[in-house]
């Protein structure tokens, strides 16, 4: 096993055989998406893309959460920060999808907003029944434009419309029932074993065949259209800059 750190240690990359694991490491902030963490994630993805012999990539979070979504402190008070952060999130999503390896989201705990978007970008996702997942952006006066295309590709336009406009969060069990999660376990204690079995199975696939199949699927659903991803970031940033969004976010932060 080899391990390296990136983004000032906010993201680590571990390689064991044909499986690489990227771990978000801001457990004290529930792995919230700051600009620095996203820089670390982008660097980690570049590192994994260059790794020889890797055919499966697991994305997970340190501590009790997968990723609590956007770091509110990072987007309040600095008018330039929202577009920078959201653009980096959009770029990270496209990079995850573009990896020639099979990507698996190991959703160990709460996956909210942009964090939940990351789980939808991965080829597969596994969580436990009591995890919290969802897209509460509209509840905060924010437009979920960066994550919307990935949710639509994951569960279909009709279901995605209901999820995004209703806002709020749901249990891991509910996420599984609507197709947002591919596998579910009853307890977080079972997650390691189930993901281990899944990655062992995936690692048996031919790397060239996996890469070719992923490339075809990405072409069929338009996953690698970076223009759409960046447009989503710009739209979200414009909405986030409005007095309504700023007031609702500050209320959430103060509460």
Image (cartoon, rainbow, N blue to C red):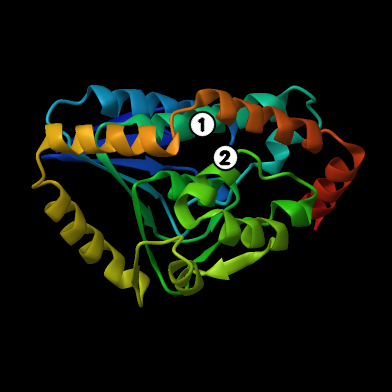
Res. 134 visible in picture = no
Res. 124 visible in picture = yes
Vertical placement of residue 228 versus 157, above or below: above
Disc on the earlier residue, 1 or 2: 2
Nearest to the observer: residue 209 or residue 233: 209
Q: Which residue is mark 2?
A: 33
Residue 225, percent from left and from top: 49, 27
**Badge 2 element:** loop
154 sits left or right of 112 in the view: left
Residue plotted at (62% across, 65% down):
169
Residues at marks 1 and 2, CA–CA distance in whole angstroms: 6 Å
Give residue 20's quadrant in the image.
top left
59 sits left or right of 31 in the view: left
| Tags 1 and 2 touching, CB below 8 Å | yes
Vertical placement of residue 91 versus 255, above or below: above
Q: Residues within 10 Å of mark 2 (few under 14, many from 20)?
A: many
Residue plotted at (51% across, 31% down):
38
Give residue 142's quadrant in the image.
top right
The residue lying furthest to the right in this view is: 243
Q: Which residue is mark 1?
A: 38
Residue 49, percent from left and from top: 27, 26
Residue plotted at (38% across, 45% down):
122
Q: Residues within 10 Å of mark 1 (few under 14, many from 20)?
A: many
């Amino acid at each position: 096993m080899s391990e390296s750190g990136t983004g000032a240690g906010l993201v680590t990359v571990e390689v064991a055989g044909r499986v690489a694991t990227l771990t978000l490491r801001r457990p004290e902030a529930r792995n919230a998406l700051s600009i620095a963490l996203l820089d670390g994630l982008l660097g980690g993805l570049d590192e994994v893309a260059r790794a020889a012999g890797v055919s499966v990539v697991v994305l997970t979070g340190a501590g009790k959460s997968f990723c609590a979504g956007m770091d509110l402190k990072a987007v309040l008070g600095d008018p330039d920060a929202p577009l920078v952060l959201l653009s980096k999130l959009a770029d990270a999503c496209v990079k995850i999808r573009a990896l020639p390896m099979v990507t698996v989201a190991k959703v160990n705990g709460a996956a909210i907003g942009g964090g939940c978007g990351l789980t939808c970008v991965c080829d597969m996702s596994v969580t436990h029944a009591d995890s919290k997942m969802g897209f509460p952006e509209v509840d905060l006066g924010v437009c979920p434009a960066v994550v919307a295309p990935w949710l639509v590709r994951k569960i279909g336009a009709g279901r995605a419309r209901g999820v995004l406009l209703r806002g709020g969060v749901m249990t891991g069990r509910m996420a599984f029932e609507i197709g947002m999660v591919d596998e579910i376990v009853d307890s977080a204690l079972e997650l390691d074993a189930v993901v281990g079995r899944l990655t062992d199975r995936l690692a048996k696939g031919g790397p060239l065949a996996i890469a070719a199949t992923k490339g075809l699927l990405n072409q069929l659903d338009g996953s690698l259209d970076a223009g759409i991803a960046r447009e989503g970031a710009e739209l979200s940033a414009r909405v986030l800059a409005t007095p309504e969004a700023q007031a609702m976010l500050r209320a959430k932060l103060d509460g």
